Image: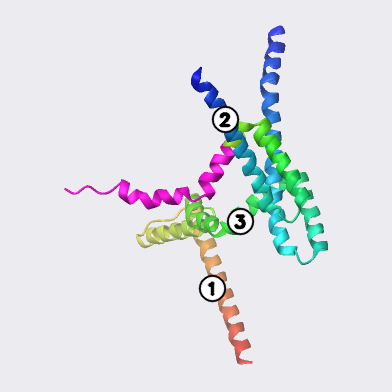
């Protein structure tokens, strides 16, 4: 018991000054950020003191009360807006091909197509299909035909609209 | 020791320069308000010079390295320093 108490005391004694240092320096960083913001807001709003004052109050509120949320929001902005195209490229050309191996996304279409072609070759070779394979072939070709008719209908509709 | 006393003087000079640097920084960024300049300079000097001088020194050195253009000089002199040797 005594050992644990002394261990906790040791941890507290070593960690608390560190927390104090980080909180103090965090406050200094907030002051620096607020000064930079003030500088730019003064450049922007020097012709209208009321807007400048209101902007100072709002900026101070966000910097000193919601600093962590603002930081996370800025990080999200940089991630999704500034580096959004990079992220999209990573997803489309990095993640989707990897997941396609397991039939996720457009990979499912390729897997089904490959399976259909394999079964077609099997039929052409004169081999008999099992029950499940027959079911798959019927389902797949029915879906294909449905898709084709739907495209045909929509194309016809488009042409009719153009003629009118 | 002979040189430790000299070191004390050097340290005081560094401390003074750091304080002046942070005061000057506040003056440059908050020139529109003298009171705010004094307040921000007081906070910066209290924390970064008096309470945590090593953090202040680190920030001072890093800011000089980043904003003075010293790093551009590396690119200027690198071709002379790392020249390809003739065979």
Query: Which residue shows up at 79% across the image and 66% down it?
Result: A48
Look at mark 1 in the image and give the residue it sits on: A148
| Vertical comparison of B21 with A1: above or below | below
Q: Where is residue A2 in the image (x, y as percent from the top left)?
A: 71, 7
**Which residue is the site of mark 2?**
B11
Relative to B16, say whether A139 is above or below.
below
- Which secondary structure lies at badge 3? helix
Do dots 2 and 1 share one subunit?
no
The magenta segment: B58-87
Q: Is the magenta stretch mostly helix, strand or loop?
A: helix
Question: Would you say residue B74 is visible in this rendering?
Answer: yes
Magenta-drawn stretch contains B28? no
Q: Are marks 1 and 3 on the same chain?
A: yes
B22 or A100: nearer the viewer: B22
Q: How crowded is the residue under tag 2: few (<14 C-alpha within 10 Å), some, or many (20+)? A: few
Instruction: Estimate the x, y position of residue B24 in percent, counting from the top left.
Output: 65, 47
Please identify the quadrant where the C terminus of chain A is shown. Answer: bottom right
On residue A80, which mark appears?
Answer: 3
Whether residue A68 can be seen here: no
Q: How crowded is mark 1: few (under 14 residues within 10 Å), some or many (20 or more)?
A: few
Q: Provide the secondary structure element on which disc 1 rests.
A: helix
Quarter residue B45 falls in? top right
Q: In this view, does A21 lie above or below B3?
A: below
The residues bearing labels 3 and 2 have C-alpha atoms spaced at a distance of 47 Å
Identify the image quadrant of residue A19. Answer: top right
Give the secondary structure at mark 2: helix
State how far apart marks 1 and 3 are (Cα): 37 Å
Chain bearing mark 2? B
Cα–Cα span, label 2 and label 1: 83 Å
- Name the mark nearer the viewer: 3 or 2: 2
Contact, CB < 8 Å: mark 1 with mark 3?
no
Residue B72 forms part of the magenta stretch = yes
């Amino acid at each position: 018991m005594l050992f644990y108490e002394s261990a906790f005391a040791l941890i507290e004694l070593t960690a608390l000054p560190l927390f104090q240092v980080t909180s103090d320096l965090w406050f200094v960083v907030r002051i620096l950020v607020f000064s930079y913001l003030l500088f730019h807001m003064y450049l922007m709003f020097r012709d209208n003191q009321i807007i400048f004052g209101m902007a100072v109050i709002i900026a101070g509120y966000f910097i000193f009360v919601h600093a962590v949320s603002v930081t996370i929001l800025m990080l999200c902005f940089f991630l999704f807006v500034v580096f959004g195209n990079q992220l999209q490229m990573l997803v489309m050309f990095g993640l989707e091909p990897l997941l396609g191996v397991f039939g996720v996304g457009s990979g499912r279409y390729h897997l089904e197509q490959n399976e259909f072609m394999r079964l077609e070759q099997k039929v052409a070779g004169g081999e008999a299909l099992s029950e499940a394979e027959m079911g798959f072939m019927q389902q797949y070709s029915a879906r294909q035909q449905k898709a084709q008719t739907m495209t045909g209908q929509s194309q016809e509709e488009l042409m009719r609209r153009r003629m009118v | 020791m002979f040189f430790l006393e000299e070191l004390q003087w050097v340290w005081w000079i560094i401390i003074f320069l750091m304080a002046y640097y942070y005061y000057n920084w506040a003056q440059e960024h908050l020139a529109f308000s003298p009171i705010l300049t004094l307040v921000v300079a007081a906070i910066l000097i209290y924390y970064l010079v008096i309470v945590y001088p090593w953090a202040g020194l680190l920030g001072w050195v890093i800011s000089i390295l980043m904003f003075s253009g010293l790093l551009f000089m590396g690119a200027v002199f690198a071709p002379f320093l790392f020249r390809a040797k003739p065979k």
